[in-house]
Amino acid sequence: MISNERPSPFGRRPYQGQSQGYGQPKPQVLEDTLKSETIQIERKTFVLTLKENPRGRFLRITEDVGGRRDTIIIPSTGLEDFKKLVNEMVKASNEIPQKAQ
């Protein structure tokens, strides 16, 4: 018997994104799009979308590279701190010399 064919002592575990009710999708949350912008940087496409749902406002940043998508969500309560940190990174990028390749 191959080791990954043995039953787990912990029982069946849900796949990522599944809830405990196997095969049952998460309930759909209604979201309103307030603003959306797209930017192409080299081979990556970024979509920034400001949305709102019953829990509040948030910024969804989606990166698309050759059809593969990754997304992060920032609650609106953290946007000022996020902006401050991005500005610090831009400043550091401009001030720190690049290493020779």
Image (cartoon, rainbow, N blue to C red):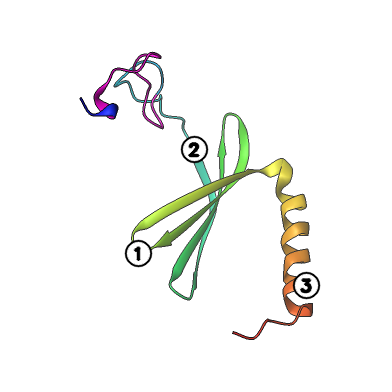
Distance (Cα) linking label 1 and label 3: 29 Å
Which residue corresponds to mark 3?
91
Distance (Cα) linking label 1 and label 2: 26 Å
- The answer to whether 8 is drawn above or below residue 90 in the figure is above
Which residue corresponds to mark 1?
66
Q: Nearer the viewer, mark 3 or mark 2?
A: 3
Number of callouts in the render? 3
Q: Regarding mark 1 in the picture, which secondary structure is present there?
A: loop
Front residue of 75/6: it is 6
Q: Earlier in the sequence, mark 1 or mark 2?
A: 2
- Is 81 in the magenta? no
Q: Earlier in the sequence, mark 1 or mark 3?
A: 1
Q: Quadrant of residue 12?
A: top left
Name the amino acid, label 2. Glu
Q: Which residues are magenta?
A: 4-18
Name the amino acid, label 1. Gly
Name the amino acid, label 3. Lys
**Which of the numbered marks, if any, corresponds to residue 31?**
2
What is the residue that sits farthest to the bottom in this orientation?
Answer: 100
